[in-house]
Image (cartoon, rainbow, N blue to C red):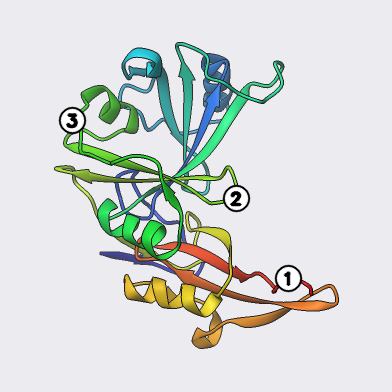
Amino acid sequence: EISAANGKPVERRLQDPGAITLLATVRDLDATFARLKRLGAPVVSRGGAPVHVGQGAQQARIVVVKDPGGHFVELVQYDQPQPSQSPATANVTDVRVRLTVEDVDSAVRLYRDALGLRLLNEPRFVEDAAGSSALGVDRGQYRVAFLQVPTSGLMLDLVDFKGADRKTVKAGIQDFGSTRMQIRVRDADAAIAAFAKFGGTVASTGGKSVELPAGNSTLKVVIVRDPNNLFVVLIESPPPAR
């Protein structure tokens, strides 16, 4: 286990727990990838070029690069265009977030069973040489759980790896490469307890929530660190007006 603090860069690989990947579906991968290369973005995919993956309607070309903050960006262009509400002139047609976790089963119990996100699939390990190459992982298997935040279109994917070299990197919220996500909850204290049950900790000073001004009222807010070093801002929704 490696630690970083005091605003230092966090050196994670895509297969390391705590790594965040922004997945962007694009209409023109080659032009987008060319612009990123001109900007000097390091290419993570093995061979330094897009890789063809998938089967049937899910066949696509994928390439992964790394941004200056240590996060990963996966560009995806499907062979068959996917349904999208984006304008015809837009290059990016869909965006989602993927978190690399130590164990998908445990993470699903936290985010689905304890916090109420919807699980959209049954995650199973696959051995996919092309997919691993696109992700920059040289061997092993991986599985992905697709979750959706209720009442929103926000997707959170959870991925873990088996048979690949991995390391856990702990970092502070101030370190480059750390990530935070905001979630509105009905009961912040209950959500804190859910994270604690799975090994999460409160990152806010004093180890408890605080009241922040919000117009003529206040919001109860707390930041927790989940077991995989994702920082989650829990915002307690005020009760409905009577």
Q: Which residue is mark 3?
A: 127
Residue 219 in the image: state x and y as whole percent. 70, 75
Asked if disc 3 and disc 1 are in contact, CB closer than 8 Å, the reply is no
Disc 1 residue type (three-letter): Pro
- Which mark, by number, is residue 240? 1
- Quarter of the image for residue 62 reads top left
Q: Quadrant of residue 39?
A: top right
Kindly indicate whether the residue at mark 3 contacts the one at mark 2 (C-beta within 8 angstroms): no
The disc labelled 2 sits on which kind of residue?
Thr
Q: Mark 3 or 1 closer to N-term?
A: 3
Name the residue at 19% across, 37% down. 141
Q: Is residue 28 visible?
A: yes
Please rate how many residues cluster around mark 1, counting C-alpha atoms within 10 Å: few if below 14, some from 14 to 19, many from 20. few
Helix, strand or loop at disc 3?
loop
**Residue at (33% x, 75% y) in the render:** 197
Q: Nearer the viewer, residue 70 or 14?
A: 14
**What amino acid type should be assigned to the residue bearing mark 3?**
Glu
Residue 120 higher or lower than 105, as above or below = above
Q: Is residue 106 above or below residue 204?
A: above
* Mark 3, other Cα within 10 Å: few <14 / some 14–19 / many ≥20: few
Residue shown at 36%/65% (left/top)?
Answer: 170
Label 1, secondary structure: give it: loop
In the foreground, 82 or 32:
82
Q: Earlier in the sequence, mark 2 or mark 3?
A: 3
Give the Cα distance between marks 1 and 2: 16 Å
**69 or 155: nearer the viewer:** 155
Vertical side of 143 occupied by 226: above or below: below
Image quadrant containing the N terminus: bottom left
Residue wearing tag 2 = 151
